[in-house]
Image (cartoon, rainbow, N blue to C red):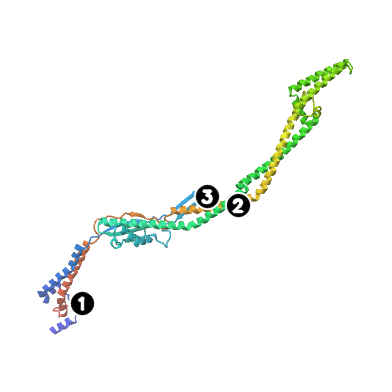
Amino acid sequence: MSLQTAQSGLLTPPLLRRRLPLRRILMGGRLSDMGRFPRYLAFALLGGAMIWAPITGYLRTAPLAFKSQSSLILPGSGASASMNLNGIGQASSYANSAFASNSVSPTETYKRLIGADRILAAAAKSMELSRAEFGQPRIKLVDQTSLIHLEITGRSAEDAQARGNALLTAFFAELDALRADEQMTREDSGLAAIADYQASVAATRADIARLQQDTGLISAEQYDAMVEATRELDARVQDLAATLQEKTQRVSALETTLGLPAQAAAATLKLYADAQFTALTDEVGLHAATLAEARARFGENHPKVQEARAAHKAAQAAALEQASIVTDLPRADLENLDLAPAGARAELLAELVRMDAERAGLAEQHVALSHRLETELDRQAELAAPAARLQDLQRDFSVAEAVFASAIARSQSTKSDVYASYPLVQVLENPSLPDSPSSPNRKLAIAAGAAATLMLLMGLVLGWIRSAVISRLLNKPNDAV
């Protein structure tokens, strides 16, 4: 019966056997033997010392480290600049947004720039530290934002904050240097073109000055004004010629009516304006009356008639002498003068003299303006080709000057576009002053030591019960399942 029971126990599958309670295993067989306990206790103390000794030494001897944190932000908008130049044109520049291109990430660029050796060396130099002593900052990009998060470690809270400020100062100084170098490079590249434009303007200006000096023509507008003035002068000369012809015909008609030329009429009026000649004329009249009376009473050879005739001739001679003095005319011309310009005839003589004077004035004016017109026409014909050449040169000068001014305006306007290649970056969060050290982490060290100690104890427990468990598994069970 015992043999069958044993065979049935051996044939029972292990998974179907009844599990033995842990307390029975611990209290049964070899587990009740406390001879191994000193060895396990010593091993537990040794293992605990090996775990906690490094942790305790690290916590006591490790230097304190503090982390200062700061944040940078890149605005996403672009920048534009415009400049209006009166009489020249407009110059404008526009910088696209830093995030407009998918192929270049400004945050990645600045991340690499912040961690560059020369920036870290400059920051370390500002704090009188070596590059190794300054340390390497931790740079992190925040996803789906334009933020750059910085962390840097120092030996104290103030030292960590100072290192963060030094790093940011060196970074912004390097950005300013890069932007200035870019501006200088662009400006140098444009100096050659500006020099060519300036030389073109100077050469065109020299040609204009030479042409102006040779011809006396200042501008094409002056030639146009000269042409217009000549046209007006020609019209004036033609009008004056018509007026002169009219005046000449009126004088000729009046001369025919009066039967004496205008000069004789003028001399007559001049004579009768002289008081002495008028008195002599009156005396001639008196002698003429006396002579007529004597002739009526006596014969031609009567002494009184001869006396009256002699007196009359003497009076006439005196009047002619005075007329010659007044008019500067010879006696032959004076004998043809009208010696009785009284009444309406005097008015006609005066009108004749006035019209002849107007005609003479118009004639002189016509001669002078005609001569001036001929001179202006010759001058105009002489300046026709130089005026066309001057107009071309002035147009070329205007174009060259506009191009030159636009090049200078572009060169100046690019100075305001400092964020074209290196976008604007701002400090969102200044380097912080940490409240507690970041290293060593006492809680983490103690938790790690406790976990190691727990695993050591679990290993020892498993080692303590392994013999009893193996023995129970190998021995025949007393009860069948």
Q: Secondary structure at mark 2?
A: helix
Whether tag 1 and tag 2 are in contact, CB under 8 A, the answer is no
428 w.r.t. 331: above or below: below
Separation of disc 2 and disc 3 at Cα? 19 Å
- What amino acid type should be assigned to the residue bearing mark 2? Asp
Tell me the distance, in whole angstroms, between the alpha carbons under discs 1 and 2.
114 Å
User: To which residue does mark 1 refer?
Assistant: 15
Choose the circle earlier in sequence order: 2 or 3.
Answer: 3
- Which amino acid type is marked by label 3? Ile
- The nearer-to-camera label among 1 and 3 is 3
Q: Earlier in the sequence, mark 1 or mark 2?
A: 1
| Few, some or many residues within 10 Å of mark 1 (<14, 14–19, 20+) | few
> Which residue bears the numbered disc 2?
392
3D distance between C-alphas at marks 1 and 3: 101 Å
Q: Nearer the viewer, mark 1 or mark 2?
A: 2
**Residue that mark 3 sits on:** 88
Q: Secondary structure at mark 3?
A: loop
Position of 37 compared to 195: left or right?
left
Query: Between residues 481 and 177, which one lies in front from this camera angle?
Result: 177
**Res. 347 in view:** no
